[in-house]
């Protein structure tokens, strides 16, 4: 593990080196001011001073209040892929999804800019594929990170007339961090200024080397506007999905992630959740972060009422106490009472942590996160 010098540690906890050395000696550790001590020792010494330390304050504590039973291999069945479209602002992510869905979502968006993650299901040669749209505007980093986390495949859209831009790079990093395969869609090839080769070069410079250049990343030149090569792109998505061998257990209680959430004037708190495992049913008791409730109604991506949602399905749900946070995990529990208890415990814990925080000393700068 990492170590920290006595004098640096003393400074962090606002004690003199002599005081720290004194405590160390009491514990049978002969130390000088330049001696390095490990985190465990530092923790013990800090306790002597009635100070609580942690390696990294920003590190979120593991939620151990809810045990999600792992699945038996024999219970797993194939599930549809979740595909997230990512890339720089205005490079044509929503237009590409429009072309795939043959609808016209872009026209309805405020200023043509995507401000949320939309979910839609598309049938491709008899196979269901779930698509998530993400915003390219620089302000929506967390939404992109969230999208990358729940996805199985990332479609990286790069406009051929603009090339690799800051949010293209960000999207690459999110996909790599989430360890999901990338398929590059070089878009707007219909434009006079389109230069697909330059895009390929710029991607290679960023470690995304496409197949024709000896790498393993599939790339497809497309025009979302004219519908060029959309079929090829869809074929590639199915191909990559097949290699991934995606599975889930539909015969268990559901676990999912909130994609987006809001307070609807008529319906109350509303959330779009992606069911990742199990089957979500109307009437299920759920915990979502610090929120709880019972599923009152479910709507499919097409706005149709549904009674249940299997793995890899995005549904809009209602029936809980407060608006949950996008990115929160949704877990079905035994009954309303359990759901309420867990949610309330989490709330209490957050309050407690906030109170403790002022008393804590962060050793962030001394111990890097392991
Ligand atoms: P954000 O969600 O704001 O990040 O944008 P986006 O990536 O979803 O881009 P969007 O689909 O809204 O398209 C941006 C602009 O590019 C629109 O004016 C589209 O009509 C145009 N566009 C998208 N694809 C193509 C294409 O293949 N060719 C041409 N010529 N224009 C395109
Ligand atoms: Mg968009």
Image: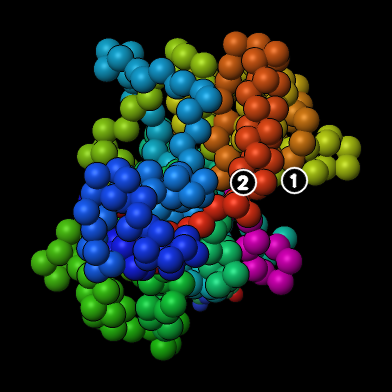
Q: Determine whether, in the image, residue 29 is placed left or right of residue 254.
A: left
Residue nearer the viewer, 19 or 80: 19
Query: How many residues crowd mark 2 within 10 Å: few (<14), some (14–19), many (20+)?
Result: few
Does the rendering let one see residue 272? no
Question: How far apart in space, not on screen, are marks 2 and 1 (Cα)?
Answer: 30 Å
First in sequence: mark 2 or mark 1? 1
**How far from the left and from the top, in percent, is residue 332?**
58, 20
* Residue found at x 63% / y 54%: 358
Q: Residue 362 in the image: x percent, y percent?
A: 48, 58
**Which residue is rendered at x = 74% and y = 40% of the image?**
323
Residue 262, numbered circle: 1
Position above or below: 64 against 32: above
Query: Which residue matches tag 2?
Result: 356
318 and 27: which is toward the camera? 27
Eyeballing the image, is 358 above or below 215? above
Number of marks: 2
Q: Residues within 10 Å of mark 1 (few under 14, many from 20)?
A: some
- Residue closest to the eye, 224 or 301: 301
What is the magenta range? 109-118
- In the image, is residue 205 part of the stretch drawn in magenta? no
Q: Would you say 101 lies left or right of 77 here? A: right
Q: Which residue lies most toward the left here?
A: 214
Query: In the depicted view, which residue is nearer to us: 213 or 99?
Result: 213
Kindly indicate the quadrant of the structure image that contains residue 288: top right
- Residue 152: quadrant of the picture: top left
Quadrant of the picture in which ligand 1 is shown: bottom right
In terms of secondary structure, where does tag 2 sit?
A: helix
């Amino acid at each position: 593990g990492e170590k920290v010098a006595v004098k640096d540690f003393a400074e962090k906890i606002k004690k003199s080196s002599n005081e720290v050395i004194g405590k160390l000696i009491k514990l049978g550790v002969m130390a000088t001011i330049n001696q390095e001590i490990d985190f465990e020792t530092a923790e013990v010494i800090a306790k002597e001073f009635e100070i609580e330390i942690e390696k990294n304050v920003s590190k979120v504590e593991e939620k151990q209040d809810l045990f999600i039973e792992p699945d038996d291999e024999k219970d797993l069945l194939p599930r549809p892929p979740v595909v997230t479209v990512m890339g720089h602002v205005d490079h044509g992510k929503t237009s590409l999804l429009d072309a795939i869905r043959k609808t016209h979502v872009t026209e309805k968006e405020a200023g043509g800019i995507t401000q949320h993650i939309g979910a839609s299901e598309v049938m491709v040669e008899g196979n269901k594929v779930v698509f998530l749209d993400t915003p390219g505007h620089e302000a929506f980093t967390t939404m992109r990170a969230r999208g990358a986390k729940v996805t199985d495949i990332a479609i990286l859209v790069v406009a051929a007339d603009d090339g690799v831009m800051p949010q293209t790079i960000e999207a690459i990093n999110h996909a790599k961090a989430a360890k999901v395969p990338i398929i590059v869609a070089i878009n707007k090839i219909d434009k006079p200024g389109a230069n697909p080769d330059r895009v390929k070069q710029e991607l290679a410079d960023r470690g995304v080397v496409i197949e024709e250049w000896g790498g393993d990343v599939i790339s497809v030149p497309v025009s979302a506007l004219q519908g060029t090569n959309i079929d090829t792109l869809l074929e590639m998505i199915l191909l990559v999905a097949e290699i991934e061998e995606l599975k889930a257990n539909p015969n268990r209680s559901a676990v999912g992630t909130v994609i987006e959430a809001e307070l609807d004037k008529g319906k109350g708190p509303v959330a779009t959740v992606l069911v990742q495992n199990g089957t979500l049913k109307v009437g299920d008791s759920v915990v979502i972060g610090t929120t709880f409730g019972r599923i009152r109604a479910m709507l499919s991506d097409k706005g149709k009422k549904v009674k249940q949602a299997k793995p890899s399905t995005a549904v809009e749900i209602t029936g809980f106490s407060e608006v949950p946070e996008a990115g929160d995990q949704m877990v079905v529990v035994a009954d309303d009472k359990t759901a309420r208890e867990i949610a309330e415990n989490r709330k209490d814990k957050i309050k407690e942590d906030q109170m403790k925080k002022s008393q804590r000393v962060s050793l962030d700068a001394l111990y890097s996160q392991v």
